[in-house]
Amino acid sequence: MVGRLARTLAQGLGGALGLLLLLEALLRLLPVSTATRTGYTLDPLILSYPPQHSFRVATGWDLRNPQTLRANNLGFVDDQDARAQPGQWALIGDSYVESSMLDAPDRPGAQLRRALGPQRPLTVMGAPGSSLLDYAERIRWASQNLAIHDFVLVLEAGDIRQALCGSGNVHGPCLNRQTLAPAVETQAPPSPAKRWLRESALAQYLVGQIRLSPATLFERWRAGGRPAAAAPPPPPPDDPSTPLPDVDAVSQAFFERVRPHATGRLVLVVDFDHDRPALVDARMARERQRFMALARAQGARVVDMAPVYAAHRANSTLALSVGPYDGHLNRLGVGLLVKAAAAAMQ
């Protein structure tokens, strides 16, 4: 009896293992996202990929927009290696600058290079999941190591609020959410088990493509299957001249940190909801207005993309997002942003 039960259990485990191995083999034939292996190889406060690292990305369970990306010598996705050149600009931002879901010629760096021409060299430093104070560190590094003093930043409205510690979009420096004091919140290196799982196509598919998170499932089970609903904070005043403590503190920290390094031109291209402006969070929209007012007072050249997108919607029905599943700018949207940025950089 015991022997028969043991054989049945062994056969079941063997079948399950065989199925897992079969799924692993099949998924390795498909463009499943591969390990990015990010780390602090460039600077203790700057998260990037290993230099010259190649990896695959795709979106969703059906592997839309598959791309094979390559990091340059600095560890940022770009087809060109970076080096010190006279008159060079740096393009800095988060996933809106990396634009990993687009073909290489359609990404912001490539489009901006074409708009500027060969006489205006450009270094691209985009890193997903980062925010405003992370951009300040890249400005510092580019100034100190590549002698770059002219910068163009692509900002989301959330980049200001996400510079508070604990936002999940911090690579290093942040401000304490309660005290607004400067802090550092670097990402811990992956454990050996996590590094091993990242090499598995099946694990990458479950976590990266369909976003299966054991921690999230456990929290939902504890909450009876319902995600916890947080009460939204009250919206700030409409007047952009009215102080907002967190926005003001993040803005002050940013400009203090970049002032010694962005000694040339500083262009801030501030994005807006390109396809559904009526659904923009009221608080974030007002924080955005406050930040732009503070940036102009600091002498930065601010490009507000809201009227640019509004003009497009008035004359075209073409969407500017990659798709309903991905709110990043598509090739057309990047083109509008680049045209506005290039005009401000003249």
Image (cartoon, helix red, strand yellow):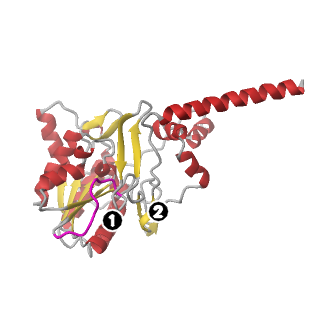
Residue 235 to residue 180: above or below: above
- Please give the name of the residue rendered at 18% of the width and 58% of the height, measured from the top-left corner: 302
| Residue 10 lies within the magenta run | no
Q: Secondary structure at mark 2?
A: loop
Image location (x, y in percent) of residue 209: 46, 37
Q: Which disc number belongs to residue 138?
A: 1
What's the amino acid at mark 1? Arg
Point out residue 146 in the picture as x, y percentages from the top left corner: 27, 71
For label 2, the residue is: 178
**Count of marks, rendered view:** 2
Crowd class of label 2 (few under 14; some 14 to 19; many from 20; radius 10 Å):
few
- The numbered dot on residue 89 is none
State which quarter of the image contains the C terminus. bottom left
- Res. 245 in view: no
Q: Main secondary structure of the magenta part?
A: loop
Asked if residue 264 can be seen in this view, the reply is yes
Looking at the picture, how far across and down is residue 277, in whole percent? 25, 39
Residue drawn at (46%, 62%), measured in percent from left and top? 178
Which dot, 1 or 2, sits closer to the camera?
A: 1
Q: Which residues are magenta?
A: 76-86
